[in-house]
Image: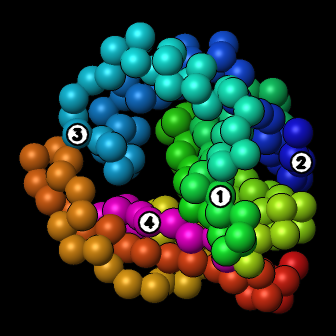
Amino acid sequence: MLYGQRVTLRRVVEEDWEKRYEWLSDPVVNRTLPSGSGMPLTPEVVRERTRKYAQTDLSSVYFTIIKEDGIPIGNTQLFNIHPWSKHAEFGIWIGDKTVWGQGYATEATGVVLDFAFERLNLHKVYLTVDADNPGAIRSYEKAGFNKDGILRDEVYKNGQYVDRIMMSILKHEYLKTI
């Protein structure tokens, strides 16, 4: 488990599938995700993905974000972990809309970055974010990520193409923020 001031990150377990399905079935939450196509996922698909995320894999680590009252509010992960180049891709989503804008994503991002740079000894963490998600972009910038470029018309979701912004943070940049 990883700990912040208001959040705890614990490894995803298979039983998390029901909460994940609830969040992913919400069109407002789903719209913020790169996979958000407006097409509902079936319980079986979410259960199978969650089972996969719960398995130990050296190339990825998946966490459930738990707020201080013990309630799960979202998920975060490092994936495409590359041990030789020492980089990984980061992702996060807050499924509980009642806590949006309260800094939980920023805090959880900091906890994951600490894990990535201090425990995994990575050199770089990168991500892509939909250009039409200003809240997420602000959260990443608060955590120290820099914009690297734009992937034009990168995803098709909700009936239109959306640009994605590439962002990254290097270990020495992260160390300046703590």
Q: Mark 2 is on which residue type?
A: Tyr
From the image, which quarter does the C terminus lie in? Answer: bottom right
Callout 1: helix, strand or loop? Answer: strand
Apparent side of residue 17 relative to residue 70 in the rendered image (left or right): left
* Tag shown at residue 128: 4
Q: Which residue type does callout 3 highlight?
A: Ser
Q: Residue at x 55, y 84 (%)?
A: 146
Q: Secondary structure at mark 2?
A: strand
Task: Say if 124 sits above or below 53 in the image.
Answer: below
Looking at the rendered structure, which numbered label has been put on residue 37?
3
Mark 4, other Cα within 10 Å: few <14 / some 14–19 / many ≥20: many
User: Nearer the N terminus, badge 3 or badge 1?
Assistant: 3
Location of the N terminus (image quadrant) = top right
Residue at which label 1 appears: 81
The alpha-carbon separation of the residues under discs 1 and 2 comes to: 21 Å
Q: Which residues are magenta?
A: 124-134
Badge 2 density bin: few <14, some 14–19, many ≥20, Cα 10 Å? some
Q: Earlier in the sequence, mark 3 or mark 4?
A: 3
